[in-house]
Amino acid sequence: DVKVTQSSRYLVKRTGEKVFLECVQDMDHENMFWYRQDPGLGLRLIYFSYDVKMKEKGDIPEGYSVSREKKERFSLILESASTNQTSMYLCASSGSGTDEQYFGPGTRLTVT
Amino acid sequence: GEDVEQSLFLSVREGDSSVINCTYTDSSSTYLYWYKQEPGAGLQLLTYIFSNMDMKQDQRLTVLLNKKDKHLSLRIADTQTGDSAIYFCAGYQGGKLIFGQGTELSVKP
């Protein structure tokens, strides 16, 4: 069974704080993704990575950065959290040559 | 780029059939997907259809694809309260999955 885990289910941070969201997958997948989910907007892709140390911008990368130092781990970083980054953040992974993505349970981030 | 549209809400009674609709703009996706998100959880792949198929049936689920109209639908027969969730359709473009807004299905006893 593919397992994608995220470091926290719920997180509350203050405006201006640096925030790290961690994602780990145990299926040796090459591809990893970070999305944010907002009501009425569906899932929007923030960043993705096809390999260790590689990253590609998604549709809404502004205000975010990522790090992939190891194949199994993909981190999303909010350098200076703002209230408009309050959202549900979902991590996903997929194997090389396949479209099917496996999702983690999500982190609900609240920035006050 | 790809644009995927869904209606936001659907309410049905237990035992009825549910039909969730999706329209898309880009025909190049080899597969089209339906994901399910239960409350408080991530997304799980529910089913998918290959782009050269018109229909796929999987137990209570039927996926219909109308390529001419760029319309995808998911029918759930004998809908149960456990089917209450958000359902996302998705197509694949440029190495990325493009998701619709999600349809929240509410099943009333």
Image (cartoon, rainbow, N blue to C red):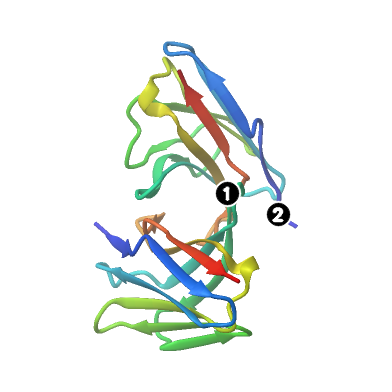
Asked whether the residues under marks 2 and 1 belong to the same chain, the reply is yes
Pick whichever of labels 2 and 1 is earlier in the sequence.
Answer: 2
- What quarter of the picture does the C terminus of chain B occupy? bottom right
Q: Residue furthest front?
A: B109
State the image coordinates of residue A66 (x, y, percent, origin top left): 48, 28
Q: Quadrant of residue B101?
A: bottom left
Q: Quadrant of residue B8?
A: bottom left
Q: Is residue A55 above or below residue B17?
A: above
For label 1, the crowd category at 10 Å Cα-Cα, with few meaning under 14, some 14 to 19 and many 20 or more, is: many
Residue B82, x across and y down, in percent? 65, 67
Give the image location of residue B24, x and y in percent.
29, 68
Q: Nearer the viewer, residue B14 or B2?
A: B14
Image quadrant in which you'd find residue B27: bottom left
Q: Which residue is mark 2?
A: A2
Q: Amino acid at mark 1?
A: Ser
**Picture coordinates of residue A19 (x, y %)?**
52, 19
- Amino acid under label 2? Val
Quarter of the figure with the N terminus of chain B: bottom left
- What's the residue at 48%, 12% (across, down)? A17
- Residue B45 in view in this figure: yes
Q: CA distance from mark 2 to mark 1?
A: 9 Å
Q: Is residue A15 left or right of residue A93?
A: left
> Secondary structure under badge 1?
strand
Residue ID for mark 1 = A93
